[in-house]
Every structure is written in C-alpha cells, then in structure tokens.
Image (cartoon, helix red, strand yellow):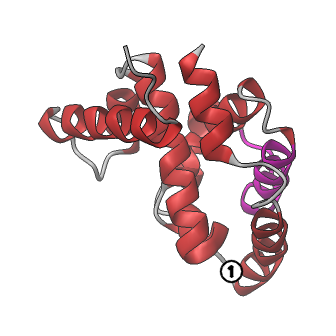
C-alpha cells in the first residue's frame, strides 16, 4: 500500500473533521457547544482541526485574528498537540500569547468564556504582534505539516 504524504493525511483528517462539525447540531455562537463538538472528534481529527485552524488564522492575520475568531478556546489543546508532535518552539509561542489575552490567569471554563468573542485592546494587539513575528520565523525551523503528519503516520 502506498504511503500517503503528510499533506494528504492532514487534508483527509481535516476534511473529515469539518464534515462532522458541519453535520453536528450545535450553536457556533455558544463556546461550550462548539468546544464540545470539537472534543467529540476522534483524536487525530481533533489534533488536525485545531492545528490547521491555528496555522490558517495566524498565517492570515496573526494571533489577533486567531483570538478574535474565538479559536483561543482551543489554545490549551493546541499547546498540548504542539508538545506532543515535538513542536516545542511553536508551543512556547502559543503559551506566551496566553498571558497577553488572559492577564488574570483564568483557567478552564472561565478562560474559555473570556477568550470567546474576545475584543483585544490596541496594547494586546501590539504585544501579540511579537508572537506573530516569532511564529513566522519558525517556518524553516519547525515545519508543522511535517511534524504533525509524521506523528500521525506512526
């Protein structure tokens, strides 16, 4: 049997996750329902879904777009996945973004409620820009597609 490329594996799992989420009956405006729908995915699909969402948003509009698109509710899971696939430098950048958007250090549901529908201040946007620069500089150092695809192929 032919070995699939990392991109093909990620694409298949992401498409499967998207189809499941589109057919799930939840209110996207309710962080808890959205979060639970994503948690209901199989582990590989969930890993791919949160990683692709992170990369799409940060590459397109930086961490500001990531957080203002409410994807910050998945930041703890994203950090876990990044560490699991050995993308420790990227995990550190995402971890460093947390105190910027969550200066009180809220946890669990309180954190998710805070970052869902988050409106960032100009100061927070400026601070997140430094995370964007560090994320962009990792392109040649930590290839997330290779790390995630390699992890999923094991």
Task: Name which quarter of the figure residue 121 lies in.
Answer: bottom right
Which residue is located at x 12 percent, y 35 percent? 23
- Magenta region: 89-106
Determine the residue located farthest toward the front in the rendered image.
Answer: 1
Please tell me which residue lies in front, 48 or 9.
Answer: 9
User: Does 93 appear in magenta?
Assistant: yes
Q: Is the residue 23 above or below the residue 66 in the image?
A: above
Which residue is located at x 80 percent, y 67 percent? 131
x and y percent of residue 145 in the render? 60, 44
User: Mark 1 — residue?
Assistant: 121
Q: Quadrant of the C terminus?
A: top right
Count of numbered tags: 1
Which residue is located at x 48 percent, y 57 percent? 70
x and y percent of residue 135 in the render? 77, 63
x and y percent of residue 91 in the render? 79, 43
Is residue 76 in view? no
Q: Is the residue 124 above or below the residue 29 in the image?
A: below
Q: Is the residue 43 above or below the residue 135 in the image?
A: above
Left/right of residue 16 with respect to residue 1 in the rendered view: left
Which residue is located at x 40 percent, y 38 percent? 8
User: Does 129 appear in magenta?
Assistant: no
Is residue 14 in view? yes
Please tell me which residue lies in front, 124 or 13.
Answer: 13
* Neighbour tally class for label 1: few under 14, some 14-19, many 20 plus, Cα within 10 Å: few
Please tell me which residue lies in front, 58 or 114.
Answer: 58
Left/right of residue 67 with respect to residue 82 in the rendered view: left
Left/right of residue 96 with respect to residue 154 in the rendered view: right
Q: Quadrant of the N terminus?
A: top left
Local SS, label 1: loop
Q: Main secondary structure of the magenta part?
A: helix
């Amino acid at each position: 049997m032919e070995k699939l490329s990392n991109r093909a594996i990620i694409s298949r799992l992401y498409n499967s996750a998207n189809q499941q989420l589109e057919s799930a009956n939840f209110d996207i405006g309710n962080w808890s329902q959205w979060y639970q729908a994503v948690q209901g995915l199989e582990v590989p699909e969930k890993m791919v879904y949160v990683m692709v969402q992170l990369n799409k948003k940060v590459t397109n509009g930086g961490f500001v777009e990531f957080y203002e698109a409410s994807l910050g509710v998945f930041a703890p899971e994203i950090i876990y996945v990044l560490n699991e696939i050995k993308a420790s430098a990227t995990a550190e950048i995402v971890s460093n973004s947390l105190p910027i958007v969550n200066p009180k250090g809220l946890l669990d549901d309180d954190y998710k409620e805070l970052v869902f529908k988050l409106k960032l201040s100009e100061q927070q946007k400026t601070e997140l820009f430094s995370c964007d620069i560090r994320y962009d500089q990792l392109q040649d150092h930590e290839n997330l597609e290779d790390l995630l695809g390699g992890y999923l192929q094991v």
